[in-house]
Image: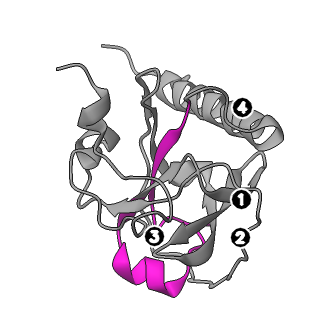
Amino acid sequence: MAEDHIRYDILAQEALRGVMRKVLAEVARTGLPGNHHFFITFLTGAPGVRVSPRLREKYPEQMTIVIQFQYWDLKVSDTGFEVGLSFSDVPERLEIPFSAVRGFYDPSVNFELEFDVKTEAPAAVEEKPAKPQADTKAAAPAKKSEGKKKPAEAAKEPAAEAPPAGKGADVVSLDAFRKK
């Protein structure tokens, strides 16, 4: 087989990241339409990722966030996104470059993207406390996923954290949304 000098694999990854970027930018402008919500898995040690030391310690390799009911200040740039989420009633600000994202999944329409992510030395840890706003629209329960699992495989694990009863969305596995 001939060598791929054009690098179609890299071009395809960049194009699919563009889909995720466009979707998140639209949600940042107008909110989540219908039943759409997102599971986003990213490498916590990837360059440019900024999470609190508490989250970095709890999720040293990767974590999955859910954008659904309680999120705030979603901002999208050409290179990544920032979002405010609450973990065990503690507000956190996350900055995630698109290059750190391993998976993007919208269970409402069974749409999934998987990305190859190069692992490098861990990025510097920076704590950025955020204050939730009264007008929130998506939830941010997080769950830990170990090793290098696909987002769908990681989602089959039980959630590591869920908001206390009556304080947010229920966390369920992705299997609840899939046809068996």
* Residue receiving disc 1: 72
In contact (CB < 8 Å): disc 1 and disc 2:
yes
Q: Which residues are magenta?
A: 36-63
Please tell me whether mark 4 sits on a helix, a strand or a loop.
helix
What's under tag 1, amino acid-wise? Answer: Trp
The tag earlier along the polypeptide, 1 or 2, is 1
**Left/right of residue 92 with respect to residue 5 in the rendered view:** right
**Disc 3 to disc 1, how far (Cα)?**
23 Å
Closer to the eye: label 2 or 3: 2
Within-10-Å neighbours for mark 3: few <14, some 14–19, many 20+: many
Categorize mark 4 by other alpha carbons within 10 Å: few (<14), some (14-19), many (20+). Answer: some
Q: Are marks 4 and 2 in contact (CB under 8 Å)?
A: no
At 56% from the left and 30% from the top, the residue drawn is 36
Q: Quick one: label 1, few (<14), some, or many (20+) residues within 10 Å? A: many
Q: Earlier in the sequence, mark 3 or mark 1?
A: 3
Please name the residue that numbered disc 3 is placed on: 45
Locate the N terminus and report the quarter of the image it occupies: top left
Is label 3 in a helix, a strand or a loop?
loop
Which residue does the numbered mark 4 point to in the structure image? 22
**Element type where label 2 sits in the image:** loop
Say which of marks 4 and 3 sits in front. 4
